[in-house]
Image (cartoon, coloured by chain):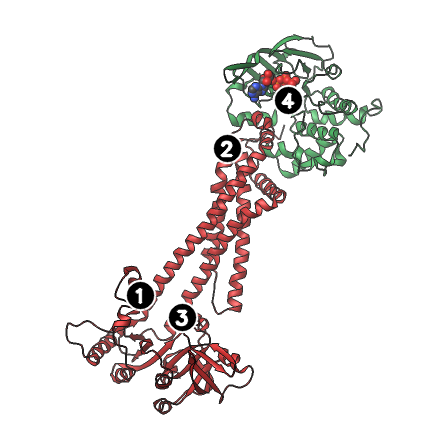
Amino acid sequence: MTVNTGAETVAPMIVTRDLKKDYVMGAETIHALAGVDCVIQRNEYVAIMGPSGSGKSTLMNMIGCLDSPTSGEYILNNQAVQDLDDDELARIRNRDVGFVFQTFNLLPRATSLHNVELPLIYAGVSSKERRKRAEHALDIVQLADRMDHKPNELSGGQRQRVAIARALVNDPSIVLADEPTGNLDSSTSSEIMDVFDKLHEAGQTIIMVTHENDIAAHANRVITLIDGKISSQTTETSNQITQPPKVVLEAASAIPSASQPPAPKSTSPTGETP
Amino acid sequence: MSSRLGGGMGFLATITEGIAVALDALGANKIRSGLTILGVTIGVLVVMVMAAVITGINSSFSEIMSSRGISTFYVAHWDFTSMMDIDIGGDDEEGGDFMKNEPLDPRWARELGRLPEIEKASAFFEAGGPPGSGYQASVSSDRVEISLYGTGSDFLEIDNGDLVQGRWWTESESERRTQVAVIDSATAFDLFGSRNPLGRDINIGRRGESASFKVIGLYRPPANLFAGLATHYVFVPFPTADKVLQVWDRMLNFIVRPKPDVPLQRALDVTHARLRQIRGLKPGEEDDFALMTQDQLVDVWGQLTGVLFIVMVGLSSIGLLVGGVGVIGIMMISVTERTREIGLRKSLGARQRDIMWQFLVEASTLTVMGGSAGMLIGGGIVWALNTFSPVPATTPLWAIIAALGASAMTGIGFGLYPASRASRLEPVDALRYE
Ligand SMILES: Nc1ncnc2c1ncn2[C@@H]1O[C@H](COP(=O)(O)OP(=O)(O)OP(=O)(O)O)[C@@H](O)[C@H]1O
Ligand SMILES: [Mg+2]
């Protein structure tokens, strides 16, 4: 299936064919992924669900190029990822993928600003430009006032927002989030989900692993994994943005002010500090 | 987007990042890093100070040699330039030529002085260098270890020191074995404080036996290392020393200066022939004395400092090795502790070489810090040696470059293995690391 943008057809962003990942544990082989076929379009907002151990994280790591499949094909933006060498993979992780982890994974001794700048350092961006873009990304997650704080001076929700800013800062094609609210309480979770929703509204493609139905409800489509295979998926809802995103960051930055009045439970500017 | 430039991580950004991370890690593990650094610091310090001292001593040695006149040579009853060979050769008969050969007779110096090719030949007895000479000078209860010289009345004509006050003794005083002495200012100060030493009496002697001497002159040694090391000079007429101080005649040497227009070899030849004659050697009999030129002495000196140099290189490489093992250890720990960080960096787009580079910069930062600390402390020691001791230490440029280079190389060499191990981890494996 392709997205129809007027006359021309756009190739899907992600295609996997018979993607498998085996772990050999002594005599036994665990099929963490047992042949996954899926297609994800630009601008989709996909939730991946399934029981614990069903292979959700494994699939996410595959899509984010953090891990390599045992067999099968993975095509990201028309590039066959399995053929790429280490440097090209690093480049994809750097520019095409923004990964948000359940455990935040911030550098503990670095400020928010420096944490967000990291991908830009590896992209070879000049320090002035880095600072500008990192500040902008922090602004999007409404943490402009916490730039010089270190992770241990931030609340869990704030840390995750720093991590989201870091995922966004290189303007990736997809944002991948593996249980981004798994370590957060429910009100902080909805704060984080607001951020994802706004990013999606601005045209960002998002794939998110979650255990919770109300989190999954934010997505347009839910893929359910069982035993390393896709067991079911809902059809896409009709609210697709047909226009491909140009510059997601710029679009997204317009959102907070635009959607401030109708979003009463969004974060207060002061945030919360422990 | 315009940011999608080619290439990877900016060169400068990685260095500053690496240094920042290294300093950060350093701050987080002060003791561990401190110990790592210490080995490198000590290694570099040893290289610096030793190099400085050896360079200083060498230049000072050349100075003293040339100040006495290039063609001045020495006569002894044994060949002390062969000292090194004896040591290496092992069991000669005990003491070798030093004990076997008859000592020189001071009257022979006068004989040599009469040769038409020779301008001056002077006998001198030397019980040098504290401690060990055994000689002491004392005034009532104050006593001080001295370097005792028994010389001729004309010694100053060959030596490069100065008489700053008073006078040297005359030839007739020498012949009459008058008990007079010329002392240096260090001795004067220790025995007389700020009082004028001229005309006062001092006791010179060893092992309880001593004789009283009247101080008639104040001597200032030439500004060179040996003068400085052998501080506390006391000069007395050779015949007097011979009579009242029971000096060991085997410590007697001649210093000989040829006339300016006489080639050195010619002077050596006639001296050699005359001495054989005096000694009553038959043709074919071996010399029982030795002539030593400045060049030979410089050679011996070179051999001695060569040994020192090897010791120095050995010591400092042990220091650097210990430091290096420390670096490899701390880097392994650092890499293991920060496996998740490496996974994170890789997941954010760091390439293998970026990780590698980060840890290399980190390792080098540690060792260069250690090296710089060593250089600072070493520089301080060199300065102190220059200021407060007579050792004329100068830090040669090569020592500084070698020290810095060696410390950076240690860091890079020993940081390489853990760094390359870290850089090859799969991001997901590194991230999962507990
Ligand atoms: N490095 C590994 N070595 C061995 N087995 C592994 C490894 N990683 C994952 N597995 C196995 O693969 C299967 C899928 O793991 P995965 O982490 O993808 O599950 P998940 O769906 O994300 O579970 P959860 O909801 O608990 O996070 C599990 O059975 C797990 O034990
Ligand atoms: Mg998981």
> Is residue A59 shown to the viewer in this render?
no
Residue A47 position within the rendered picture, expressed as x and y whole percent measured from the top left = 69, 15
Q: Foreground mark, 1 or 2?
A: 1
Dots 1, 3 in contact, CB < 8 A? no
Q: Choose the circle earlier in sequence order: 1 or 3.
A: 3
Q: In this view, does B328 lie above or below B52?
A: above
Q: Mark 3 lies on which chain?
A: B
Q: Foreground mark, 1 or 3?
A: 1
Look at the image and tell me in which quarter the N terminus of chain B lies. top right
**Distance between the alpha carbons at the discs numbered 4 and 2:** 31 Å
User: In this rendering, do the residues under marks 2 and 3 share a single chain?
Assistant: yes
**Distance between the alpha carbons at the discs numbered 1 and 3:** 23 Å
Q: Does the residue labelled 4 lie within 8 Å of ligand 2?
A: no
Residue at the spot of label 3 = B63
Residue at the spot of label 1 = B83
Residue B35 position within the rendered picture, expressed as x and y whole percent measured from the top left = 55, 47
